[in-house]
Amino acid sequence: MTLSWMAWTWPTAAFFIFIASAIITMGIWERYSPGGGPRRGILGLDTTRGDRLFISILGSAFIHLAWLGIMGTPLWGAVIISIIYLIAVFKWV
């Protein structure tokens, strides 16, 4: 079975590997440090670790789309902004 019709590239594979590793890491973190109770952040929302992961992944997708629309490629700037965004979401949201 060939997957050439899906146009797999290294960046695409890296994206899916990152998503899978983030979910696995969150599962392990929850296993060894259960609870991670809801926390009220700067937006006034009660969020758990999983919620913050989802918000950061979704926001990073929008950051990358905006970067592509405004700046084009390469995406290294969007990656840096996304990492800063992820840290901010886990710290304050």
Image (cartoon, rainbow, N blue to C red):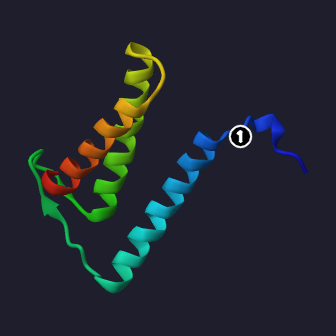
Question: Where does residue 25 sit, x and y in percent of width and height?
Answer: 42, 69
From what the image shows, is residue 58 above or below residue 90? above
Question: Where does residue 86 sit, x and y in percent of width and height?
Answer: 28, 48
Amino acid type, callout 1: Trp
Please tell me which residue lies in front, 44 or 55. 55
Specify the quadrant of the image occupied by residue 40: bottom left
- Residue bearing mark 1: 8
Q: Which residue does the image show at 44% across and 61% down from the upper left?
A: 22
Question: Where does residue 51 sit, x and y in percent of width and height?
Answer: 31, 56
As drawn, the residue found furthest toward the bottom would be 32
From what the image shows, is residue 47 above or below residue 31? above
Q: Which residue does the image show at 91% across and 51% down from the upper left?
A: 1
Please tell me which residue lies in front, 68 or 93. 68
As drawn, the residue found furthest toward the right would be 1
Q: Secondary structure at mark 1?
A: loop
From what the image shows, is residue 22 above or below residue 82? below
Asked whether, in this view, residue 49 is left or right of residue 41, the answer is right
Please tell me which residue lies in front, 25 or 41. 25
Specify the quadrant of the image occupied by residue 33: bottom left
Question: Where does residue 70 sit, x and y in percent of width and height?
Answer: 38, 14
From what the image shows, is residue 71 above or below residue 90? above
Asked whether, in this view, residue 58 is left or right of residue 34, the answer is right
Asked whether, in this view, residue 40 is left or right of residue 57, the answer is left
Dot 1: within a 10 Å radius of its alpha carbon, few (fewer than 14), some, or many (20 or more) residues? few
Q: Which residue does the image show at 35% across and 77% down from the upper left?
A: 30
Asked whether, in this view, residue 56 is left or right of residue 38, the answer is right
Q: Which residue does the image show at 39% across and 46% down from the upper left?
A: 57
